[in-house]
Amino acid sequence: MIARHDELPPEAVAIRRAVFIEEQGIPEPLELDGTDPGFTHWVLHENDHPVATLRSKVTDGEVKIGRVATLARARGRGHAKRLIEAAMEAARRDGATRAYLSAQETVIPWYESLGFTAEGPPYDDAGIPHRDMRKGL
């Protein structure tokens, strides 16, 4: 089940804390930086347990997708793909024609498999190499 929230739900915070802060070592003030208001927050549940999350926001015909995270024990089952597809479909209904995100370099091939294309040079975000990626909807 995928749940959509207008405000950051506690289960999304718990997933992001586990993945970004505990697993990847991103400092909490950088991860929970107060930029969540205005985003739609998505949480995927598996067997009634929250296991994956992302946030999205449509602005000027583009949907920004961010904070894509899946708990380690639930990876490899297509949860993030389902969330991204749900967010992009909702954005299409809201008039968006493109999606963009900032991808950690290690997962660029995975985003490419979803139709995203890397743009611009790599850059550092919280000590992790990233690239911007875009996709037409």
Image (tube, helix red, strand yellow):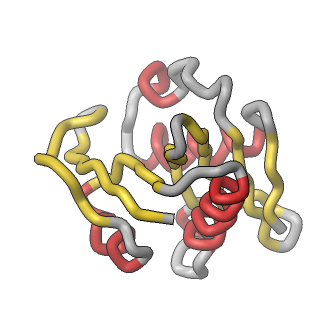
The front one of 29 and 8 is 8
Direction right: furthest residue: 48
Point 55% across, 23% down: residue:
35
Point 65% across, 53% down: residue:
91
Horizontal and vertical percent position of residue 43: 73, 54
Total numbered circles: 0
Decide: is 9 above or below 82.
above
Horizontal and vertical percent position of residue 18: 56, 46
The front one of 40 and 10 is 40
Decide: is 124 above or below 28.
below
Horizontal and vertical percent position of residue 127: 23, 36
* Left or right, 2 with reference to 48: left
The N terminus lies in which quarter of the figure? bottom right
Give the quarter of the image for residue 85: bottom right
Point 85% across, 73% down: residue:
47
Give the quarter of the image for residue 5: top right
Horizontal and vertical percent position of residue 71: 59, 60
